[in-house]
Amino acid sequence: MLVAAVAEPAPSEQTSFSQLPRPQVIATLAGVMSAMLLAALDQTIVGTAMPRIIADLQGFEHYAWVTTAYLLTSTAGVPIFGKLSDLYGRKLFLLGGVVVFLVGSALCGAAQSMTELVLFRGFQGVGAGCTQAMAFTTIADLFPPSQRGKLSGIFGAVFGLASVVGPTAGGFLTDGPGWRWVFLVNLPLGAVSLAILLFLFPNVRRPRAHHSIDVLGALALLAGVVPLLLALSWGGRDYAWESPLIVGMLIFGAAMSATFVWLEARAAEPIIPLSLFRSRGIATSMAAVGLTAMGMFGTVLFIPLFIQGVIGTTATQSGAVLTPLMLALIVSSTTAGQLISRFGRYRWLAITGVALAAVGMLLLSGMRAGTDYVTVVRNMIVIGLGLGMTFPTFTLAIQNNVDQAVVGAATSTLQFFRSMGGALGVALFGSVLTNSFGTTLRVVLPPEIANGLTPEQFARIANPQALMNPAGMNAVLRGVADPLSPAGDLYIEAIRQALAFSLHNVFLLAGALQVLTVLLLVLLLRDAPLRPSANRTSDEA
């Protein structure tokens, strides 16, 4: 371990967030919220611009890496920065995160090749991870648990707002001044946030003589998370799940994750204190957040595919169907935060939220090729209302069970579980979709047609791209059937039926995971009264 001596805070520094003037509290929240919105927005705004970026920079083989690099660095950095901010104060890391994010944005906007863009996106993700680690932790610094609900709900709604605004803003900037402004627009917005944080965010540092930095733990965490996320991103898409590369990365990532746990149990000041998981409320909330994120990411990722491929609407409509979900999520998250602060209880909201999300996902599993657009929107609203309730609830449940000295580590660990759950969900549901589609397509095709196809021909038609546009239809049916003939119609309908059934399996699995989350985890959550002060008393501990 590397031990760094840190002097006592200077007289001008504060050692508590309490008794701050109200204008400074409001300005601090505004600065943190704007910084968090930038980081969250960058996860959704880039997707719309990617086709134009690929056409300009000529690097289709690096398409997925633009997102993967950002996900890797932002996810792996969250728990590390959260713990370091507990030791050395929030302001240093919050300002540093915003600066790194803005520098990364400028570099992305100036990228001349896909390789450069991937590297700069990874650098940008470091700043985003640091900023996100500070966001919910700052609420815990400024307010005791009994008052955090309102702000936690609003901050949770910011992520939903980013999901609504991001794709539209990305399309507007790409069609207008150009795709580079998808990144460059962060600079003026981030400069305002940086100025607010620099001059108004309090520099609070707790008086401690020495700090021990868990360097080995940080390295083990990175060595565990990076190969696992890479394997989950590549598996079933770029490489077969049983390929030596994917299997090797999964084994190495699991081994390093086990090493990380072993090191944390022996570290003087661990990045993720294992003592957190001795609390049933914390352990239950962490697991529930991970499983809920799996269901959320699976739903958001595959609903547009159902709209375009099965129902047959346009790409614009398929993107717009996510808007009701996110708007419902924003309203639900904000309302849940208000209710928690008013009544001082959160268990019933956690149960209701996950149960509603389960109902919505099970409703999705009942959709078929004849399902209308209005039914899809209804189901999305149900899911949004449920997921929105969970955003402030589990955050508050965890912060209410820890002392202020480790609230940064606890909150950032929660964000880490949410990110890892999302990555696992994308990998799991993507694998279910891929495996179900080919099997189902062979079943729904008439036997005489299915048996007459060569393996190469079947592999070509086992592609839902045929349902997206005429160019995709021609590419898939080339050498098999005339797309405008009755035989072509038969193939297209078979592909549509296979896709609908495969997505049924995806949504059914997502709903089943939420049901298990309620029965095995959320019902066990203890509804501890919200504390009126930041630290626990000896009886509460």
Image (cartoon, rainbow, N blue to C red):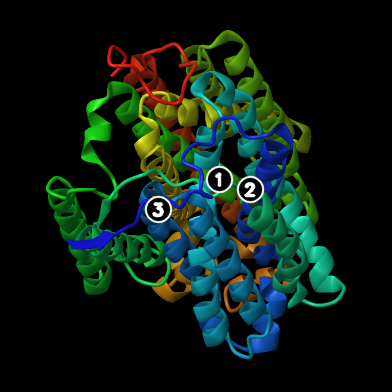
The earlier-in-sequence mark between 1 and 2 is 2
**Extreme residue in the right direction:** 176
- Separation (CA) of disc 2 from disc 3: 18 Å
Assess disc 1: are there few (<14), some (14-19) or many (≥20) residues with their C-alpha within 10 Å of its C-alpha: many
The earlier-in-sequence mark between 3 and 1 is 3
Name the element at disc 1.
Answer: helix
**Residue at x-position 60% and y-position 17%:** 341
Mark 2 vs 3: CB contact within 8 A: no
Q: Quadrant of residue 522?
A: top left
Task: Residue 485: tell me if it is visible.
Answer: no
Mark 2 or 3, which is nearer the eye?
Answer: 3
Is 539 placed left or right of 504 in the picture?
left
Identify which amino acid the numbered label 3 is placed on. Answer: Tyr
- Separation (CA) of disc 3 from disc 1: 16 Å
User: Pointer 2: what residue?
Assistant: 32
Mark 1 vs 2: CB contact within 8 A: yes
User: Pointer 1: what residue?
Assistant: 135
Is 151 placed left or right of 463 in the picture?
right
